[in-house]
Amino acid sequence: MSKPAYSYIRDPAEIYRQSFAAIRRETDLSRLDEDLTPVALRLVHACAMPEIVDDLAASPDVTRVGRDALAGGAPILTDVEMVARGVIANRLPQENDVICRLGDPSITNLAASQNTTRSAAAVTLWPDQLAGAVVAIGNAPTALFRLLEGLAEGWPAPALILGFPVGFIGAAESKEALIEGAHGAPYITLRGRRGGSALAAAAVNALVDVSE
């Protein structure tokens, strides 16, 4: 059997260069603060949808806030392992801990006792590590809602909330709740149903490498 003669770019550096050149050509960054541009580029790179920048919402100066937090050794708290696995650990400035409590043996019983999802129950294990942390939520709207409830109850404030829950039920609403009441915590989020673990991880990685 003859080998197909596919023509494609094999050099990873060239793929990277051309990818970000295409993103800059095709993405309207004009409405974004300069501070948010590196994060926006990484998010578009993660999903190949330039139009998502129209739905980005963020606090002022969030990239600097996030970079400073990570440089100071802040842990990264995530709602699912897919986000944790997407963070490029060897680029973190202080070998920052990347923590997902969803697999904790107590979670199933805790969720049942709280009459909620496992993701939301896992968030209730965060308070001891929450102060000054970078939170990256890329799956469960209930996790983001529970975080906001906890902050309203007096939980320690994280340095930054990256809110990218995805789905048809609660995702858009949880992100609007974040925008309307993050209880003093800076945030980056994507309005509407779109989101996901790849975007949440990309946002974290953008805080580490803002070269684009």
Image (cartoon, rainbow, N blue to C red):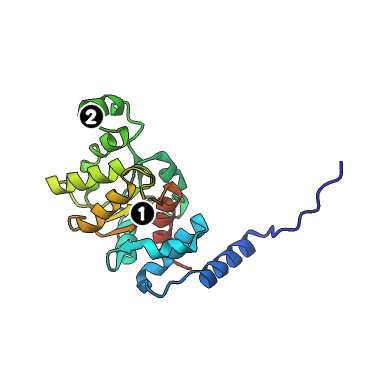
Crowd class of label 1 (few under 14; some 14 to 19; many from 20; radius 10 Å)? many
Any part of residue 123 in sight: yes
* Pointer 2 or 1: first along the chain: 2
Q: Give whichever of 99, 116 is nearer the camera.
A: 116
Most extreme residue toward the front is 168
Where residue 167 sits, quadrant-wise, is top left
Mark 2 or 1: in front is 1
Q: Give whichever of 195, 12 is nearer the camera.
A: 195
Marks 2/1: CA distance?
A: 26 Å
Where residue 91 sits, quadrant-wise, is bottom left
Most extreme residue toward the right is 1
Most extreme residue toward the left is 154
Q: Position of residue 56 (x, y in %)?
A: 36, 62
Residue for point 29% across, 42% down = 143
Q: Position of residue 86 (x, y in %)?
A: 46, 47
Q: Give whichever of 98, 90 is nearer the camera.
A: 98
Q: Amino acid at mark 1?
A: Gly
Residue for point 14% across, 48% down = 152
Q: Secondary structure at mark 2?
A: loop
Q: Secondary structure at mark 1?
A: loop
Q: Give whichever of 173, 139 is nearer the camera.
A: 173
Where residue 30 sits, quadrant-wise, is bottom left
Write down the residue under mark 2: 115
Write down the residue under mark 1: 192
Q: Amino acid at mark 2?
A: Asn
